[in-house]
Image: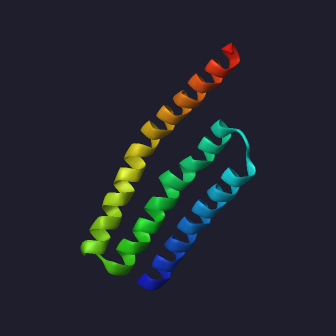
Amino acid sequence: MSSVIADALLALGVLVIAASSVGVAVLDDPLHRLHLVTPAALLGVPLVAAAVVVRDGFDAAGFAAIAIAVVSVAASPFLAQALARSIEIRRRAARRT
């Protein structure tokens, strides 16, 4: 039963990451692309980490997956804000010239 749950979590996580990747490839505006990275970081990575924990338990791989998911979820909003700010600064500088 845990194998089925792990496979479902993994499939859902990979689906979210793949959909975000396709959206990033299709859109041309950097700010729109940035919006599509968020689901991959906030949903995809934790779902894949949960699949690892369900399948392997709380061993070294499970704790590493949890750590990666926590860092991804915690850092994603700050990185997105910094990137959006840098995009806007570059756009303003390009408009001045």
Find the residue positioned furthest to the front: 97
Q: Is residue 16 above or below residue 85?
A: below
Res 65 → quadrant: bottom left
Residue drawn at the location 30% of the way across and 73% of the way down: 61
Q: Is residue 68 visible?
A: yes
Residue 52 in the figure: left or right of residue 63? right
Coordinates of residue 24 in the picture (x, y in percent): 66, 51
Please say if 19 is above or below 37. below
Of 65 and 79, which appears nearest the observer? Answer: 79
> Furthest-left residue in view?
59
Looking at the image, which residue is at 56% across and 51% down?
A: 39
Which residue is more in the foreground, 83 or 64? 83
Quadrant (top left/top right/bottom left/bottom right) for the N terminus: bottom left
Q: Say which residue appears at 56% left-offset and 68% top-offset.
A: 14
Horizontal arrangement in the rendering, residue 89 relative to residue 6 (left or right): right
* Outermost top residue: 96
Colour option used: rainbow
Q: Position of residue 13 (x, y in %)?
A: 53, 66
Q: Is residue 28 left or right of residue 71?
A: right
Residue 31 location, x and y as percent?
64, 36
Tell me the residue at 33%/79% (across/down): 56
Q: Quadrant of residue 15?
A: bottom right
Please indicate whether residue 68 sits to the left or right of residue 90 in the image.
left
- Residue 58 seen: no
- Quadrant position of the C terminus in the picture: top right
Q: Nearer the viewer, residue 9 or 73?
A: 73
Q: Horizontal and vertical percent for residue 73?
A: 41, 49
